[in-house]
Structures are given as structure tokens and as C-alpha cells.
Image: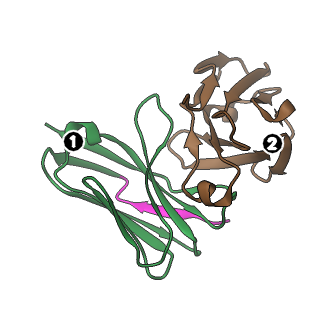
Amino acid sequence: EAGVTQFPSHSVIEKGQTVTLRCDPISGHDNLYWYRRVMGKEIKFLLHFVKESKQDESGMPNNRFLAERTGGTYSTLKVQPAELEDSGVYFCASSPGSAAATLRGQYFGPGTRLTVT
Amino acid sequence: GQQLNQSPQSMFIQEGEDVSMNCTSSSIFNTWLWYKQEPGEGPVLLIALYKAGELTSNGRLTAQFGITRKDSFLNISASIPSDVGIYFCAGLRASYDKVIFGPGTSLSVIP
């Protein structure tokens, strides 16, 4: 079974540009989460999809961030326009639809390292 | 918001030594998780704890869910070089909820 995949693995952009990150969850996982780790700090929650619906977007920093999950499969996270403080590693995670399975933890992708210069 | 504290922040140990790291929270969690992250990879779940007082092992790893539900520890016995990485404690209040991560403990093992 393939794990959570993310693309690209690295992205270097200039301040003011737009970047789109993609996440492919484990097949069949209804829950998809985005997290971010800014240099040296803890991994912080951004938002949670259940299928194609946004369940919780309380962690989104501001309206420069837009996440979508059309069709309930892969998800994209767009940052427009990017600012210096957006640099960090963006992780995607997924978990199955059952409560019991979710309690066993979420499966994380390798992350996208975003550098805004 | 909820915050987790981990100690120590970093550790440098000799191969073969035992390791202990702690995590405390200002609020209660119903599930405690321990993840390990290696360079270029995402966090990988090591151990999940579901009940206060629960002690769980996974090979050389042992973790406990504190009785107050506000703390947890992770022990690694007889460390080996491949134990190198960042260890994150994390909490879940309920199923489907977001995972709250601690800042991590960076472990280096000297052969």
C-alpha cells in the first residue's frame, strides 16, 4: 500500500509569488490534514478535510492560504502571495474514516520544504 | 491554545545507552502519541497510548500515559545509531481531532 505522498519535495520561491503544494493521501482515507513546521518550532495544525469538506480550518494562518480537496481524493494547498514567514515544512497526513482507526494516529507524508526568499 | 512541552530539547548519547524523554501538557489529552522524524521524512508513529496509566512497549521503546493525562514519557533501551532523529510527543483530544505536537527532542547517537 502506498503511503501519503507530497509534491514537490522542495520549493524555493520569491516573496510575492504563488506556490501550490499537493498531497495524495493513502487510498481510501477520508480524513486529510495539513500541518506546518516553521524552523525549530513544533508542528502545527492547519486544517482538516473529511472527504471533500473542510471539517476544521482553525489553524490556517490567514487568507493567503487556500486549501482544496476536490472529489475527496488529493488535496492542494496554495499560498498566494507568499511571504517570508511562510517558509517551513508543510506536512500532509491522512487517516481512515473510522474513529477507532483514527485514534491509532495519522499517517504523515514526507513533507514539502518551502523556502520564501 | 494547548501547548506541549518536551524535555530535553536535545540529547547526545553513546550507542548502547538508555534514553528517556518526557512530555507535559497544560491540559488533558485522551490519546498520547509518540512520533519519530528522520531527515527528509515525515513523522512516523511509534507508539499510541489510550488510557491513563497505560504502559506500552514496541521493541526497545516503552512509553507511558501519565495518570493525570497531562504527561507521558518515552524510553529507548540500548540505543543504536538508527535511533537518531527527532522524537515528537503529540496528543489527541478525540478521534478525528487535530494532533497537537510538542516541539520535539533531537536525539544523536554516537557510535
Residue drawn at x 44%, y 81% is B67
Rendered colour, chain A: brown
Q: Please report the bounds of the magenta region as a residue range.
A: B1-9
Question: Closer to the camera: disc 1 or disc 2?
Answer: 2
Can residue A114 be seen here?
no
- Within 10 angstroms of label 2, few (less than 14), some, or many (20 or more) residues? many
Residue drawn at x 12%, y 48% is B16
Q: Secondary structure at mark 2?
A: loop
- B8 part of magenta stretch: yes
Q: Would residue B79 be found to the left or right of residue A13 on screen?
A: left
Rendered colour, chain B: green
Residue drawn at x 17%, y 39% is B110
State the residue in front, A39 or B89. B89
Residue drawn at x 47%, y 78% is B52
Query: Please, what is the three-letter code of the amino acid marked with disc 2?
Result: Lys
Q: Which residue is mark 1?
A: B109
Looking at the rendered structure, which numbered label has been put on residue A51? 2
Position above or below: B91 against A23? below
